[in-house]
Amino acid sequence: MNDALWAWARIPRCFRSILYGIPLPLSVVLITRNASAQLPECLASVAFADEVVVVDSGSSDGSAEVALRYGARVVTKEWLGFGRQKQFAFEQAAPVPGCG
């Protein structure tokens, strides 16, 4: 197998569409707690994304409501620790088509 064919075979099928100029959907995932002051600017800066998921860990300042106003999907989850919370948030995003 030549090098170019070998390299092509290593690209997961679900990502090959990028090489054909077919864009994949983009999901933005945020974890928050009491971030209502920062959310408007942050969410406005990712308005181009196909999906915005905000995982809130019990805010008392209206963060979830701000996120909803900007069109984000809000999931509430108690704080699991930074790494586990980010992993949980990542798992809430829509799967890449064709990747499972």
Image (tube, rainbow, N blue to C red):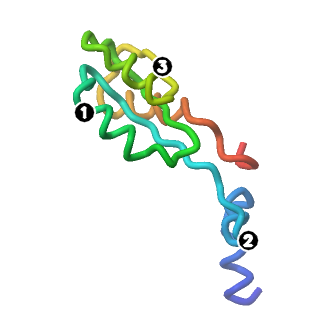
> Is residue 27 rendered to the left or right of residue 99?
left
Quarter-of-image position of residue 31: top left
- Image x and y of residue 26, in percent: 56, 48
Q: In which quarter of the image is the N terminus?
A: bottom right
Which residue is found at the position 32% from the left and 20% from the top? 63
Amino acid identity at mark 2: Tyr
Please say if 12 is above or below 92: below
Q: Name the residue under label 1.
A: 38
Which residue is found at the position 34% from the left and 34% from the top? 83
* Secondary structure of residue under mark 3: strand
* Label 3 Cα neighbours within 10 Å, binned few <14 / some 14-19 / many ≥20: some
Nearer the viewer's eye, disc 2 or disc 1? Answer: 1
Q: Which of marks 2 and 3 is nearer the N terminus?
A: 2
Task: Name the foreground residue: 7 vs 94.
Answer: 94
- Image x and y of residue 85, in percent: 38, 28
> Is residue 23 rendered to the left or right of residue 62?
right
**Count of numbered labels shown in the rendering:** 3
* Secondary structure of residue under mark 1: loop
Q: Name the residue under label 3.
A: 75
Task: Name the foreground residue: 89 vs 62.
Answer: 62
Q: Distance between the residues labelled 2 and 3?
A: 34 Å
Task: Name the foreground residue: 20 vs 90.
Answer: 20
Q: Mark 2 points at which residue?
A: 20
* Secondary structure of residue under mark 2: loop
Amino acid identity at mark 1: Gln
Q: How far apart are marks 1 and 3 (CA)?
A: 18 Å
* Label 1 Cα neighbours within 10 Å, binned few <14 / some 14-19 / many ≥20: few
Q: In which quarter of the image is the C terminus?
A: top right
Which residue is found at the position 44% from the left and 23% from the top? 69
Nearer the viewer's eye, disc 1 or disc 3? Answer: 1
Amino acid identity at mark 3: Val
Quarter-of-image position of residue 39: top left
